[in-house]
Amino acid sequence: MNGSVPIGSSLTATENARSWLSPSGDFAFGFQRIQGKDNYVLSIWYDKIPDKTIIWYPQGNPMVSRGSKIELINGRGLVLSDPQGTDLWVSRPISNLAYAVMNDTGNFELFGSDSRKIWESFSFPGDTLLPTQIMKRGWVINSKKSETNFTGGRFQLRLLEDGNLVLNSRDIRSNYANKAYYISDTYDPSNSTNSGDQLMFDATGYMYILRRNGQRFNLTPNDALPSGDYYHRATLGFDGVFIQYYHPKNSVGNTSWSVSWLVPENICRDIIGEKGSGACGFNNVCSLNGASRPNCECPAGLPLLDPSDPYGDCKLNFTPSCNEGDFDFMELTGVDWPGTWSVYVQMDSVSTQECKDSCLHDCFCAVAIHNGDTCWKKRLPLSSGWTNESLSMKAFLKYRKGELPSVNFPRFPGKKKNQKTIITIISALLGSSVFVNVIFIGVICLGFFLNYQRKTNNHYPDTKSLDTNLTHFTYRELVEATNGFKEEVGKGAFGIVYKDERPSWKKRRQLALGIAKGLAYLHEECSTQIIHCDIKPQNILLDEYYNAKISDFGLAKLLIKNQSRTNTGIRGTKGYVAPEWFRNTPVTTKVDVYSFGVLILEIISCRKSVKENESGNDYGAILTDWAWDCYEERILDTLVGNDLEALDDYKNLTTFVMVGLWCVQENPSLRPTMRNVIQMLDGVVEVSEPPCPFPLSVTIS
């Protein structure tokens, strides 16, 4: 079938499936199987080129399973459905659809009964532009996630309303656009008619920005295109480089696409910004290959978070601590992570050794960068890492000494001696007859068993005979609870204290909602309204199913009937006390709402409301301030410590953070009631953007 496609036509995703061809046969519309995967992608491709280069696919998730179908339906348009018949994508509803055309420009078009064009693929590009295609102001082109993953990736090409063509990375979860790493500078604030209006790709293969006054701003260099008959395309690569290619139409043999021009020339260097991870993922290091494309490599000690994604984030394979004797530095020459938002200390007139020592003594320092006599201390995650032989600076990456054991159990020195004794006895027995050996071994095993039973009974007597509420734990339970005694918190009179494993994001959500319901009961459902006045983690009890119970009403205030506020002295605990307690004004249930806001931010981030930094650095010391910074800068991954479960539930994570920020507003009238909080956490009520929680404090200072 060439060119025209009648109503009712369909294609099915199978091997060697047919496609809808353009009249010349240059382009085909249909399903392509993804190499190395049992998935297909609805697409348009160059059909006469051996690699069948894809130049269009629907935005979103165009990857489908075998047996999926695309159909041209009157009243609905192009409809993509899975093997069960569920709609996956629809072009747009069209009541008078007559036919479709796959034309020789690579544009797939839908026409009405009056032969008027109603829809076209050129208006909804994937990651590629073709000759005769126009990009208008406000349009966005997203890169692929990887070479074989056609879902939206980390990079965007945008023609802004002001007329600038820009390239930027983005946060995939929130779609937040980071600072542009390429700008065409086609915005003229002094003369709007001189600003860009459209990105043009003419039939001869030249790309330019058409200004509003009709003048051109050329993108394709005059000598960049060869003479002859060539295919042309401009593609935003999954690695963030925008490239115009050409390919001979009548090629002999296995020829490939050649580059006519690209931007930026060095993405590793140019993508440095205040936010975002850079050309490679967080903590990763970018280097440029011979084709001006980025290669990414994790430093030793920071393996890939996802081994299948070399361009992704690198993670720490050990737990940071303040025990400086456990760490040393790996020296990396010509490597830098210039993203400024990970810098928290800059020191001038210091030597290399002083720079290293300062980082070693600092719990938060992950890497020290030294250049000349200047030292920058940086915390994780590190962004925009890149390497270049011309860089004179040195990076000192902190790592834990030695190799991590496969099982992180504490070692007991006395065991080895006992084991040697046992081995000696057994060896002696093996020298006797087999029968005697069997008897002796049996006696020894019985003795060990009885001795073990005696010790167990001494250490763990029957709890029924004890008049106590203390719970006894087996060693195995303690190992599981502390993740193999992985992180030491401190030491007390009874020995070393180890950190428990972080509860799952699902449990933390359940916990926050349970506390909110408990407070709503005290505030609105009791016959007499109760202000708890001391909401904090220590006063929240949990049962075996993580159901929250509010406890310790020693500071609670009982309001009389028809009373909504009361005058009383300051009550509560540092870090959870609402500002109005210090202003000698009547307090309401909103003081509990404030405390709940701090508490929910603690639950989200798994850290205390006030964090004392031994290094003297105040960044992140106050949780409410830090949470606002993370929200405002759209770096919630930092707030949750790269908790992948929470980040995969990004919508709810954002909702919970926004609710927490509303609850800690300095002005009590801006805080929601606990009933409103429950509705927002449940998703019943939409949460609006919270303002800065502490504008009054900022003004006073």
Image (cartoon, rainbow, N blue to C red):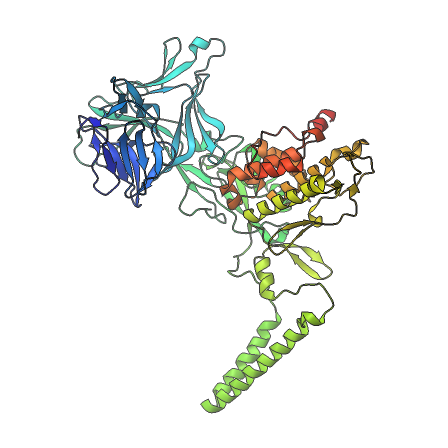
Please indicate, yes or no, whether residue 163 appears anywhere in the rendered image. yes
Residue nearest the viewer, comparing 587 with 528: 528
For the point 66% across and 31% down, the residue is 693
Percent position of residue 101, x then y: 23, 25
What is the x, y in percent for residue 78?
30, 30
**Count of numbered circles in the view:** 0
Residue at the (83%, 37%) spot, across then down: 568
Q: Position of residue 361 (x, y in %)?
A: 64, 46
Query: Quadrant location of residue 410?
Result: bottom right
* Residue closest to the eye, 322 or 527: 527
- Residue nearest the observer in this picture, 2 or 501: 2
43 with respect to 177 (left or right): left
Quarter of the image with the N terminus is: top left
Quadrant of residue 628 within the rendered picture = top right
Report the residue at 58% width, 53% height from top. Answer: 501
Residue at the image position 69 percent from the left and 45 percent from the top: 614
Residue 65, compared with residue 441, is above or below; it is: above
The answer to whether residue 336 is left or right of residue 608 is left
